[in-house]
Every structure is written in structure tokens, then in C-alpha cells.
Amino acid sequence: MRHDEFLKAVQEHAQLDEGGAERATEATLTALAERLEEGEATDFASQLPQELKEMVGRAAGGTGEPIDLTEFIEKIAEKEGLSEHDARQHASAVVDVLRETADRGAGRRHPEPASRGLQNAVRALTAAKIREEAAMAIKGREVRAA
């Protein structure tokens, strides 16, 4: 997928203009890359357009710790200068486009090993989102029971 195609897909998913899609993409990818170890970041970035590969490469160098969705959204909100609600919508759009990119790579007859890095990063974000939603549902039940 080319850079302009990636941004256009983010625009459509998040209902953003071109500049908003660029900011959302940069904030989401750098927040994610900051958590990835160097090798993971290289694998993750391999399926991205060159401009985005470079962005991920500059931000990489984390410890590979699991991604906490709340912290992830807070970082994106800070990077974009937006509310957490808007940052969540933007991150969701970027992750959806990443998922589509990973799915395209996985659909090849002989998927590149590097596409697994992208798939793993998307899975980690999806798992974090599921864990947060489950925790919120449990908390909601506790509040109603009280």
C-alpha cells in the first residue's frame, strides 16, 4: 500500500481531512513504535509505505512491554493535542487500516515473514482493547450492583 493510499484509508475510516489523517497516523504509529523493541519495529514497519517505515524507525526502541490501551490512547491524545475520545477514534481508524494492510500481506501465497510483525502489533492492540472493554464491563456491573 502506498503512503497516499494509507492516508486516504485513514481519512475514510475516521472522517478526517488529509492533515488530520496524517497527524492521526503519525501519533498512532509513533506511540506504538515507542513500545516495540528494535527488531519488532523493523518487522512491523516492513509492510508500511516508506514514509511510515521511517517514522516507525525513528520512534522505535521500547522494551516490548504489553500495550496498555488507556496509556496508548493518552499518548495519542497528547501527541495530537486532542481529547482522549477523539484520539481513540483516530487510533481505531489507523489500527483498522493496519489490520487491512496485515490481512493483505497474510493473503499472499507466500507471506513475507515481516508481515507477521505487523500482524502481531495489530493483535496486541486488539487484545489490549478487548481487555479494557472487559474491565469496563465488569466495573459497570459492580457499580450497578452497589
Image (cartoon, grey):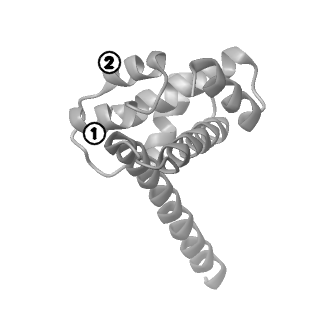
Compared with 122, 43 (above or below) is: above
Compared with 63, 142 (above or below) is: below
Q: Residue furthest bottom?
A: 145
Compared with 135, 125 (above or below) is: above
Identify residue type, mark 2: Arg
Q: Position of residue 116 (x, y in %)?
A: 37, 48
SS for tag 2?
Answer: helix
Q: Quadrant of residue 114?
A: top left
- Residue at 67% from the left image edge and 31% from the top image edge: 10
- Residue at 40% from the left image edge and 48% from the top image edge: 110
Q: Residue furthest front?
A: 109
Task: Give the quadrant of the C terminus.
Answer: bottom right
Nearest the eye: 130 or 102: 102
Residue with the mark numbered 1? 40
Residue with the mark numbered 2? 58
Nearest the eye: 142 or 129: 129
Q: Position of residue 21 (x, y in %)?
A: 66, 23
- For label 2, count other residues whose C-alpha is less than 10 Å away and answer few (under 14), some (14-19) or many (20+): few
Task: Give the quadrant of the N terminus.
Answer: top right
Q: Is residue 68 visible?
A: no
Q: Nearer the viewer, mark 1 or mark 2?
A: 1
Identify residue type, mark 1: Glu
- Residue at 32% from the left image edge and 22% from the top image edge: 57
Q: Quadrant of residue 16?
A: top right
Q: Alpha-carbon distance for marks 1 and 2? A: 13 Å
Q: Position of residue 84 (x, y in %)?
A: 60, 39
- For label 1, count other residues whose C-alpha is less than 10 Å away and answer few (under 14), some (14-19) or many (20+): many
